[in-house]
Image (cartoon, helix red, strand yellow):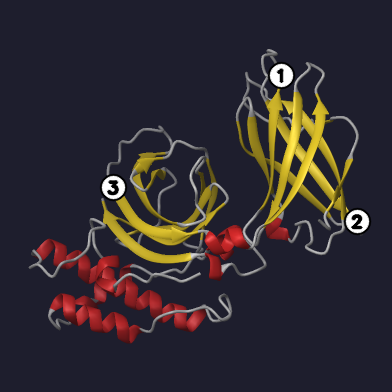
Amino acid sequence: MKKEWYSFANRLSLSGEDVKGEELDEMTKKHYENFVLAAIQNEQQNINSTKQQFAGGKHYGTAVAAAVCLVLLGGTTAVFHEEVHAAISHFSYSLSTALGLENDIAQYAEVIRTSRIDKGYVVTLQEAAASQEALVISYTIQREDGQPIPDSFGLDGALYVNGKPIYGGVSGSSGFLDAENKCLGVEISYDVPGTDLSAENTYELKFTAYNSYTAKDDIGGHWNFKFKADGSELLADTKFVTLKDEFVLSDGRIITLDTFSDNPLEQRITYHISNTDTKGSCLLLKLTATDEEGRTAVFTVSQSSSERGYLLNEKMSENGRIPADAKAVTATLYVQEFPEESGKESNDYTQIGEPVIWDMTN
């Protein structure tokens, strides 16, 4: 994929708009100073620490960042404030690391590493990758004063593609990247149904803060990002297998497995449900897939509605994927009714029908 590395100055823009060379006020200049410092330190860390993580990957040296710093700030050395050095450590959080993948997916990811600061919090959008009807991102959260992040702090992100709001499902995970709980790493997958992600698209992420204890937006703050991502190479490297296996539920509904797709980022099974006029309960699906050598992958629902959805391989981070050299896979589908009252999964799955065999050589 041809990477479009935007000019360093535009990556530092607070509003996401291009910097046209106009005179900057002192507040904006101060923000730029912090951004340039963050970028310089981040790039130095990349040089020192990511050669193993991103074997063969690309990065830019600090000379480029320093040159842009001179252009933006007129050669001032104010960017090197000691208190800023001391307050924040700059973390690189790749999608490969965030998703726990053993294989590096750097060639499919857009490296953003742009920061926004508001209400004392620094949010850094790290990487993004467009896949099959999904955008996957990794980002980090830190406090501007370098103190630990409170458990109550959370972000809610709204996604726009080519200026249009996206109302698909969202899933993800998070965890602290340091022992002091000063840097929170987050990965999120946004479902983008009905949009062609196999070409370059413009994405906007608009984060707002909320108190996770009260689920209210009572913290304030806005962290907005705008970038482009191209999913053509990842989708070109995606293998599709047509399935068309049917499983009949006791209430008459029919679950049909449509396709299995496999790429370095994910393994996915799409399905649809017919006879939905039956007043059945909501369903949770799980599928196990075992190849001819006994290697097993487990798929669980990531997104669903009453009529369709898809399952993702939940063990990708543990090398639990269906191997590329598998010739035949035995798939077994399980279901449990979603407990509407408690909202808690019982993990009490029941097998539906008989296992089916997929020919993986096509």
Compare marks 1 and 3 and give the one earlier in the sequence: 3
Q: Position of residue 51 (x, y in %)?
A: 54, 81
What residue lies at 70% left-to-right and 41% top-to-bottom? 300
Q: Nearer the viewer, residue 12 or 38?
A: 12
Compare marks 2 and 1 and give the one earlier in the sequence: 1
Q: Secondary structure at mark 3?
A: strand
Which one is closest to the eye, mark 3 or mark 2? 2
Residue type at mark 2? Gly
Mark 2 and mark 3 in contact (Cβ < 8 Å)? no
Q: Position of residue 304 (x, y in %)?
A: 61, 33
What residue lies at 48% left-to-right and 55% top-to-bottom? 137
Residue type at mark 1? Asn
Q: Which residue is mark 2?
A: 294
User: Does residue 150 sit above or below 78 in this rendering?
Assistant: above
Tell which residue pokes out farthest to the front in this image: 362
| Label placed on residue 222 | 3
Mark 1, Cα crowd under 10 Å, few <14 / some 14-19 / many 20+, is few
Residue type at mark 3? His
Q: Position of residue 161 (x, y in %)?
A: 39, 47
